[in-house]
Amino acid sequence: MTDGLQLAIDGLYAAYDGNPVLHDVSLDVAAGEIVALLGPSGCGKTTLLRCIAGLEEPTAGRIVIGRRDVTAGRGVPAEKRRVGMVFQEGALFPHRTVVDNVGYGVARGRQRDERGAASLRLVGLEDKAQRMPGTLSGGEQQRVALARALAPEPGVMLLDEPFSSLDAGLRWQLRGEVRRLLKQVGVTTILVTHDQEEALTFGDRVVVMRAGAVEQMGSPGDVYARPASPWVARFVGEANLFDATFSAGGADTVIGRVPTVVGADGVGDGEGILLGRPEQLVLAAGDAADEAATVTTVSHFGRDTRYEVTLAAGPIVTVRTPGPPQYQTGASVCVHFADGRAFGWPRHQMATGEGPARPLDSAPGGY
């Protein structure tokens, strides 16, 4: 139905009333690729989307859609950029039928009817064409909004938290359907979200933003397993961060030695921080002689169990194990790393500005 266009963003800056929002953002998105733009509220995600769509004017930098620089000169207006957009709320016209909503962005005539019908077939709502939006469920309304965005055959699709207003079960189902559909039609897509699970499952690549800048970009697996900084580690999933002493290809921590450590640029000897995801840790029965830790919270989620454990040295760590609980609140346990490699950052890298240079508690900026 449509062909995806390559999207290139180079050195983009944006500001509101003189207040900087985007800082030197650069990003290349391949034709047909789905990129999830992840970050906390106020980090500049939506501003970046609006600049791509032509709804905001950047103060510097370039946006190239296909082979067309849409920021050159006075810029290309939004309606001529071949960009579709779906918002958090579907923003459907309540006084128009479903098919009229879908065809709104297409020129009048036979083509409007044909594209409207084709878009509704894509989202599986051709039997609802003459219904009014208010008679549809929330999930159906978002599918109509997607059909409306696809009808003009865009080369780039922008999704601004389109699933956040839905309940959890429907959100999971709909985003899976939407991802399959976007891959089917081949449109280049950027999804904005602050939901880490959504970003990791929806995007071919994930771009993590913080304070108006790109903190990391990579595959979902790399961003989760090899985060660029302790801040990214904490933001993308649960993270236990341990003070560590690196030596001879391993690290000594408060819960023991980890035999293999892989760092951002290769961890040498010295002090640093080690990442332990909850599923990388294991529990074993302990006693006072082992300086055992104490289980303080047990939460069973059906497929796995989450423990909060207070170590003998004081810190609280999170551990996830498959299946039902094996330990109850108050139990004495020992915590260890499971077999496999752990990821860490040397302190000299953080101190010299390489890697995670910003403080962990710095507040995000932007809008």
Image (cartoon, grey):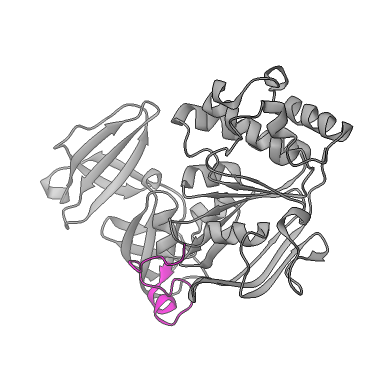
The dominant secondary structure in magenta is: loop
Q: Quadrant of the N terminus?
A: top right
Q: Is residue 358 shown in magenta?
A: yes
Q: Residue at x 39, y 43 (%)?
A: 279
Image location of residue 51, percent across then percent down: 63, 62
Image location of residue 115, percent across then percent down: 81, 33
Residue found at the very far front of the displayed protein: 95
Magenta span of residues: 345-367
From the viewer's side, name the closer residue of 344 and 228. 228
28 to 123, vertically: above or below:
below
The picture quadrant where one finds residue 308 is: top left
32 to 113, vertically: above or below:
below
Q: Residue at x 47, y 62 (%)?
A: 367
Q: Is residue 211 left or right of residue 13?
A: left
Q: Is residue 4 left or right of residue 199?
A: right
Q: Residue at x 70, y 41 (%)?
A: 149
The picture quadrant where one finds residue 272 is: bottom left
Q: Residue at x 79, y 53 (%)?
A: 5
The picture quadrant where one finds residue 256 is: bottom left
Image location of residue 58, percent across then percent down: 62, 70
Residue found at the very far left of the displayed protein: 288
232 to 336, vertically: above or below:
below
From the viewer's side, name the closer residue of 116 and 264. 116
Image location of residue 345, percent across then percent down: 43, 68
Q: Is residue 215 left or right of residue 359?
A: right
